[in-house]
Amino acid sequence: MDSSDSSLSGRLAQLRQRIEQACLQAGRPAGAVALLPVSKTFPVPVLAQALDLGLLRMGENKVQEIRDKQAELADRAVQWVMIGHLQSNKAKDIARLASEVQSLDRLSLAQALDRHLQTEQRSLDVLVQVKTSPEPSKFGLDPEQLPAFMQSLRSLDTLNVRGLMTMAVNSEDPQAVRACFATLRQWRDRLVELGHEQVQGLSMGMSGDFELAIQEGSTEVRVGSALFGARNYR
Ligand SMILES: *Cc1c(COP(=O)(O)O)cnc(C)c1O
């Protein structure tokens, strides 16, 4: 692979190779880890290019941005994945537009989504976002609350709970980062033992730490900058 290839297809190929390599090093089958491209802040033509390359799911963290991009890409089959903090008053838009929410972190939001999904006659894949680091800036459910929360979700038929999501601590210390990922995996295992067999997915790992996440059992990495380039926040 030519590491100077800066086209999107070149970066995608390099990223897939790094994911595969990390799988093999972790003794996991190549292909054990899915890629969620995180397209937040990138303009529609870049998303169109990604769609042309067969990337159909797009991770976004703002409802308004999903609405705008969806309107421009209305003729394309995009599966919008909400990965950012979601206010309950935006649940209606998400129930209409998204194929998945990875940032479910409270019952009131789950109930709001369920209500709107029933109206839309849709269902939604969800991951429960878990707070695995003490940073106050990180959203997510406290892990101790997971068993009761999962139990409450059982009655919401429109939500298909397929796993857990976390963001690791922002740290230079790989051990601290790994500990966050290990915490998420251990809670997943515990929930499966408690009878929540559908809770298998572990969405963990971003551009800066996905190799560590794969070592700790990630089943999906959410990658933005390593795929699309540096983000330009305005
Ligand atoms: C932005 C974002 C990512 C991707 O971050 P990169 O470092 O660009 O790969 C992953 N997950 C969440 C929740 C994000 O907000």
Image (cartoon, helix red, strand yellow):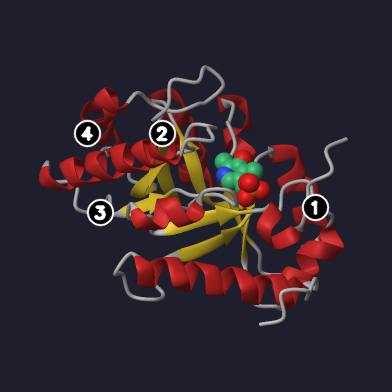
Q: Say which quadrant the N terminus sits in.
A: bottom right
Q: CA distance from mark 3 to mark 1?
A: 33 Å
Q: Residue at x 69, y 39 (%)?
A: 63
Q: Say which quadrant the C terminus sits in.
A: top right
State which tag comes first along the sequence, 4 or 3: 4
Q: CA distance from mark 1 to mark 2?
A: 30 Å
State which tag comes first along the sequence, 1 or 2: 1
Tell me the element at label 1.
loop
Q: Is residue 196 left or right of residue 105?
A: left
**Residue 166 location in percent, x, y?**
44, 39
Vertical relation: 153 (above or below) 11: above
Q: Which mark is residue 42?
A: 1
Quadrant observed for ligand 1 in the rendered image: top right
Tell me the element at label 3.
loop
Q: CA distance from mark 4 to mark 3?
A: 12 Å
State which tag comes first along the sequence, 3 or 2: 2
Vertical relation: 25 (above or below) 225: below
Q: Pointer 4: what residue?
A: 151
Tell me the element at label 2.
helix
Q: Pointer 2: what residue?
A: 176
Q: Residue at x 32, y 55 (%)?
A: 217
Q: CA distance from mark 4 to mark 1?
A: 37 Å
Q: Amino acid at mark 4?
A: Gln
State which tag comes first along the sequence, 4 or 1: 1
Question: Are the residues tagged 3 and 2 within 8 Å (C-beta)?
Answer: no
